[in-house]
Image (spheres, rainbow, N blue to C red):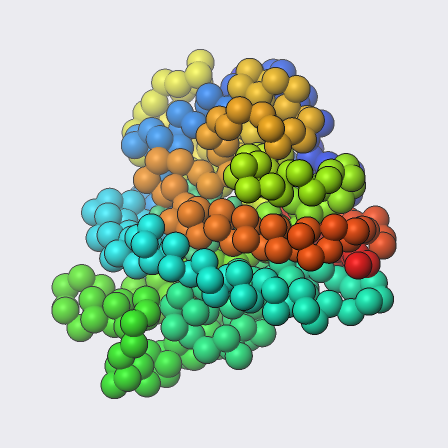
Amino acid sequence: MKTVIQSPVDPGFMQNPYPFYDTARAEGDLVYWEDYKKTAAVSHRAVQALLKDRRFGREVPNELHRPGPDHLSPWLQVEAHSLLEAEPPRHTRLRALVMRAFTSRAIAALEPSIHDLSHALIDDFPDTPFDLLDAFCTQIPVITICRLLGVPAEMSPNLLRWSHAMVAMYQASRTRETEDAAAMAAQDFTAFLGDYIEQRRTDPQDDLITRLIAAEEDGEKLSRDELVATCVLLLNAGHEATVHSLGNGVKTVLQLGLGPQVFAPDQIDGTVEEILRYDPPLHMFTRYAYEDVEIFDHSFKRGDEVALLLGAANRDAAVWKDPHRFDPTRHIVTNTSFGGGLHFCVGAPLARLEMRIALIALFRRWPTLHLSEAPEYSNTYHFHGLTRLMVQV
Ligand code: HEM
């Protein structure tokens, strides 16, 4: 296996990681990424195969489990009970409870409220240059996930603050300050949810928190810690990636000067899929090997970690002709932006719905929308999103 070297905080890489992915993929399905000290899967077939291979998983193998440092304990406590960090049978139980609320009917029922929200936000756009990421791309997913869970939308500024501090723990630029901020955010978020859940116990509504509270009261299905961790995960995952899918997508469309035809009813689904493939908001997730595995000419030992580079898989020329070209009309092939296998994104249908409605509304109301400043990506790898998206209508 070839070794590749690339700092994830290098400014050029941050702005455009795709040339590095091409160089790495030219070396094979798997490479050793020196800066992460990890094997990385870079081809579409390797990323897909490892996502689906049950001999690999997200939960830390028992013998590698170490108690984390004290200063991180509120954050670790949430992580320890998260569905995203669990494998069966715990994962199966938690995911089944969440999926009850994510039925296609429940998601489709959100359509009118996402539509109204998009138009209300557009009504408030100023006629001077403004940050679309803040005024539009962030508000749609955060308010929608609040509504789905049954958390007052007025809480969204706090949720955003807590969420940003907590997910910064996964960024290559993480420091001791990042850790302190994440621990504090986890503590405040957990305290808020603790109080809110108590309040809602006596005031049940038709929403996800009420259903999860009922599952907790049932006894065996959901512990109190799991209830809180599930709400935190849904509130965080429910907006972080969608914000930047919208931001990266609008940026691409404006830079390429694509016309309103890409948002026509018979084309919008292709456009959303191409946005997700071409410039996804999450570029890397990792897995542990649970047994010794021989795959893609490499021998994994139990406990070895492998990084799955979703952003690299989506630009694999073995699957997409001319993969660096943004082409909303191309034949849709499942991309890896929502992962795959057991942990496949719970919110994929919701994210697609939000993107479809928001993009149609935005470009129908403002066909002359244009960039007022060159957008830049932030130093947050493995997240891949803009610092801001200055536009003018
Ligand atoms: C475009 C937006 C989104 C993208 C690109 C995205 C991407 C992903 C990816 C790649 C994973 C799998 C991680 C892994 O395999 O290690 C994942 C898992 C997850 N996502 Fe999303 N996501 C998005 C939106 C959402 C939304 C809107 C929600 C909630 C409403 C959500 C909730 C979750 C949850 C709960 C999991 C964990 C599933 C499990 O472990 O079984 N996501 N997402």
Q: What residue do we see at 46% from left, 21% from top?
A: 45
Q: What residue do we see at 40% from left, 66% from top?
A: 148
Q: What residue do we see at 44% from left, 52% from top?
A: 350
Q: Is residue 54 left or right of residue 299?
A: left
Quadrant (top left/top right/bottom left/bottom right) for the C terminus: bottom right
- Is residue 71 visible in this depiction of the protein? no
Residue 113 or residue 37, whichever sits in front? 113
Residue 233 or residue 62, whichever sits in front? 233
Q: What residue do we see at 36% from left, 18% from top?
A: 294
Question: Which percent across, then down, holds residue 162?
Answer: 54, 69
Query: Would you place residue 158 above or below residue 29 in this image?
Result: below
Query: Would you place residue 195 above or below residue 116 in this image?
Result: below
Residue 364 or residue 353, whichever sits in front? 364
Q: How many marks?
A: 0
Question: Which percent across, then down, holds residue 78?
Answer: 39, 64
Question: Which percent across, then down, holds residue 334?
Answer: 46, 30
Query: Would you place residue 180 above or below residue 373 in this image?
Result: below
Query: Would you place residue 70 above or below residue 346 in this image?
Result: below
Q: Is residue 142 left or right of residue 198?
A: right
Quadrant (top left/top right/bottom left/bottom right) for the N terminus: top right
Residue 320: quadrant of the picture: top right
Residue 30 or residue 271, whichever sits in front? 271
Question: Which percent across, then down, holds residue 389?
Answer: 75, 55
